[in-house]
Image: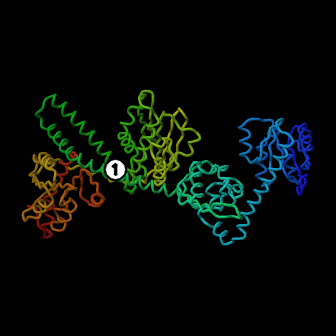
Amino acid sequence: MKAGRPRVSVLLVDDDHDEHFFVKELLSSVTTTSFDLAFAASYSDGLARLETENVDVCLLDYHLGEQTGLDFIAELQRRRSTVPVVMLTARDDLGSDALAIGAGASDYLVKGKVDAWYLERALLHAIDRAAALAARLEAGQALRRSEERFAKSFRANPIAMAIEAIDDGLLIEVNEAFARLVGQSQAEILGHTTQSLNLWVSPADHIAFVAELRKEGRASSVDASFRTSDGHRRRVRVTGELIDVHAERCCLLVVDDITERLQLEARLMFSDRMASIGTLAAGVAHEINNPLAVVVMNVEMLAESGHKNSDDEELLDGVRRAAERIRSIVKDLWMFSRADEETTGPVDVRQVLEAAATMMWAEVRHRAQLVKRLAEVPAVRANQARLGQVFLNILNNAAQSIPEGAADRNEITLDVRSQAGGVLIEVTDSGCGIAPEVLPRVFDPFFTTKGTGGAPGLGLTICHSIVADFGGRISLESQVDRGTTVSVWLPEAPAVRVAPPPTRAKARSIRRGRVLIVDDEATVAHALKRLLAREHDVEVAANGHLALALITAADARYDAILCDVMMPEMTGPELFAEVARRVPHLAERMVFLTGGAFTANARAFLDAVGNPHFEKPVNGKQLLALVRARVEQGDSGAARRKGRGGRASP
């Protein structure tokens, strides 16, 4: 026996009694070390003897009845046992020895291939390794005791911190914040390496980090990804500083979890992009609506002219249908351009879903048939544009899950019905579906199944946020190769009392009135003039300044003033303010026309002003009816103003 080395107590845990005699014979032939061998024939007996007896090292079989040696090692770790383990088994394969070493065994020996010298060497190495590990852990504890100021700062710091041995990555101290980040307790982390915890998502990042530490003495703000114990990934920024802990070269790790910060930045960028797209969409809608208004009004006038044959009727009907389709598309585009608005109110989910389906039709048509089951449902409390954003994203995901070219064999179903004080919207596709292990993460920020070239993985996260803001719920069910159903439940909006329709007045002869049209688009103004000139005397002003001069003239009398909202030099709201200040009774007769009030001020004005407004393209019959009503009100209004001493209309 070597001088100074005590007797070594060995516990053999093996369900084969013959192995006891074999190991005893091997150890008895060793002349340099004295071994005391004890034997446990079962998993439970082995654990019990380790609890009650003084054991230096444990020899462990791989198979122990219903349990395995790996289970045995895991239980020792749970009990915080420091007894080293050497696995001695008949299993001779690389996979098993890797599992054993990874679980915490000091060595892996194969029965029949071990002689006395090799067995002695493995047992003594395990004891020495355990002693070194204990000393290193004690060094971390000594550091905590001896450097109290550092220790307090280390433990209480809200930023995740750890002390890692440079040579092998052993974690000898971690604070609570680090444990929360990893998702394990401090006791479960200490004594493990960053490799055994599988902490760095990219091992290459860790290698580069350590290389920079060795070269420079520190590594500053290295972006990386850490894997938590439940498999989730966190984006982190790691800083390291070389320190000495009881003569061992270590690294003080400072790990800043930047996941939420990156999520916020990505959402802000997404919101900015949506706002830019919304502004562009509103501008496009405005530019389309003006020429479309000319087309619609001219078609209506031709349809009512009476000088046409059956071919003309068919041509006009085709133009009218095409114009109505353009009007519907522009209206949908205008709806989605207002996603920056935060106001909520009663919203018809069917209208929003139909609009989203129209916008996505080009993406859907080559992949699936669109089936709609839209029952009569109450309005929900939401924001029209933001709800449209939710449906656009869900429909886009549904379409992307189905390959092109099989539209006759696939379906995307839109199902709307009342449920439990609200409205349930279900979008079901027959696409590829989502794997069960992926399904719990579909609402996680930055999670995507579309690869690095796909979307940034924020779509469903933002949908979840929007729906939650409305007091609703969103969920997803899916089966691989069977399809996916996304369910959105939204609470019913409070009932709004609707005023009864006005009593229809008796038919009377139409009085010819005076109308002023204010519009910087000459073609629109000309079309409006042609529409109204059959019944009224019409003047046109090409801008707000000319209109103001006409309205404030001494002999001005107008039954109706049709004014565009968005004009250069002087806008419709600015003209209204001047007219209200100078000639208040004519301000009451202003009617506003808009091809898309896409500025915040214009929208606020139309919402606040009491005057009626029409969206271009204008419905000619409705506009004519409104002007007639203004003309009919002219005499009674003039009489009231004259009785109060004001200027009366002639």
* Mark 1 residue element: helix
Residue 491 seen in the current view: no
Q: Residue at x 64, y 64 (%)?
A: 243
| Residue nearest the observer in this picture, 492 or 63 | 63
Query: x, y percentage for residue 525?
Result: 14, 50
Q: Image check: 261 left or right of 329?
A: right
> Does residue 411 sit above or below 47 in this rendering?
above
Query: x, y percentage for residue 132?
Result: 77, 57
Q: Quadrant of the C terminus?
A: bottom left
Give the quarter of the image for residue 100: top right
Instruction: Give the residue at mark 1.
Output: 277
User: How many labels sit on residues?
Assistant: 1
| Residue nearest the observer in this picture, 501 or 266 | 266
Residue type pointed to by label 1: Ile
Q: Residue at x 60, y 55 (%)?
A: 210
Residue 552 seen in the current view: yes
